[in-house]
Image (cartoon, rainbow, N blue to C red):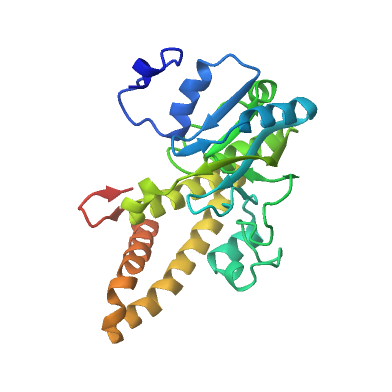
Amino acid sequence: MTAAEFPEVQVIQTGANLGFAKANNIGIGQSHGRYLCLVNSDVEVEKNCIHKLVAFLDANKDIGIAGPKIYGRDGQVQSSCFRSPNLRNTICQTLALYRVFPKNSLFSGWEMKDWTFDSTRDVDVLSGCFWIVRREALEQVGSLDENFFMYGEDLDWCKRFHLAGWRAVFYSEAQSIHYGGGSSAGAPVRFFIEMQKANRRYWRKHYGYAGQFFFTAVIFFSQLVRLLPRLAQFAIQPSSRQAIRPKIDRSAACLHWLVYGKARLGDGTEIS
């Protein structure tokens, strides 16, 4: 349909799901412009959004990658920027301290709950749902790391832009709508474990085996702390079982994966 109705668009059919990074790298390899826009299929690009981003980057030559303000399907601003993971904010995130102290930057974790996303600013990480990238910066930083099949590539790529001396900027004057969550909603346990796999890969790549061990220990402890009281609640409160069963399944599968290197899902498939 796309090829028939939009003949000016180059359609690349890979024949398989190659993952976010590899698929985008194929598109990048066919591109020619001085800027590249990587936009997820569940994003509605609002009028003049790309024009505003291009003008902004034209006026700020030290910006390597930027993203617009993102709204959800409910009209609320989405958290589309994150802090790079470190020892402190990873602990705050996994222990849910960001929920207890959402406006305190010391405890707010990765998600920047202490910010309203109402102003343009430099950030550590931009969500991969919508990026505009300067060609010059891309040629220096390199393409997406294809070892990240799903999740984690945004953390890795933005960190590499920073390491190469380029700014990553959230530009609030450009806006778009992200309808996301469709894929993960259908298989929450699988996607949760895939996210942890990606995060652990990120820690291993940038902080070595010590970083990987730290992240694994924090995730193990946090899932164990969540699982035990939920099991108790499941046993003594039958009315709550339907609501908490998915959370129990998620924590149990994650712990099994961390200990044994694989987890069996409800449909019989395994994640390793």
Q: Is residue 99 above or below residue 168?
A: below
Q: Is residue 159 above or below residue 212?
A: above
Q: Quadrant of the N terminus?
A: top left
Name the residue located 73 percent from the left edge and 48 percent from the top edge: 119
Viewer-closest of 12 and 70: 70
Q: How many marks?
A: 0
Q: Is residue 224 above or below residue 42?
A: below
The image quadrant that residue 18 belongs to is top left
Look at the image and tell me whether residue 63 can be seen.
yes
Q: Is residue 148 above or below residue 270?
A: above
The image quadrant that residue 205 belongs to is top right
Q: Position of residue 215 (x, y in %)?
A: 53, 57
The image quadrant that residue 68 belongs to is top right
| Left or right position of 200 against 233 | right
Viewer-closest of 225 and 122: 122
Name the residue located 28 percent from the left edge and 81 percent from the top edge: 239
Q: Position of residue 250 (x, y in %)?
A: 35, 62
| Left or right position of 195 against 110 | left
| Left or right position of 85 against 201 | right
Look at the image and tell me whether residue 144 can be seen.
no
Name the residue located 37 percent from the left edge and 21 percent from the top edge: 2
Q: Position of residue 56 (x, y in %)?
A: 74, 31
Question: What is the residue that sits farthest to the left in this orientation?
Answer: 268
Name the residue located 62 percent from the left edge and 50 percent from the top edge: 82
Question: What is the residue that sits farthest to the front in this orientation?
Answer: 47
Q: Position of residue 44 (x, y in %)?
A: 50, 37
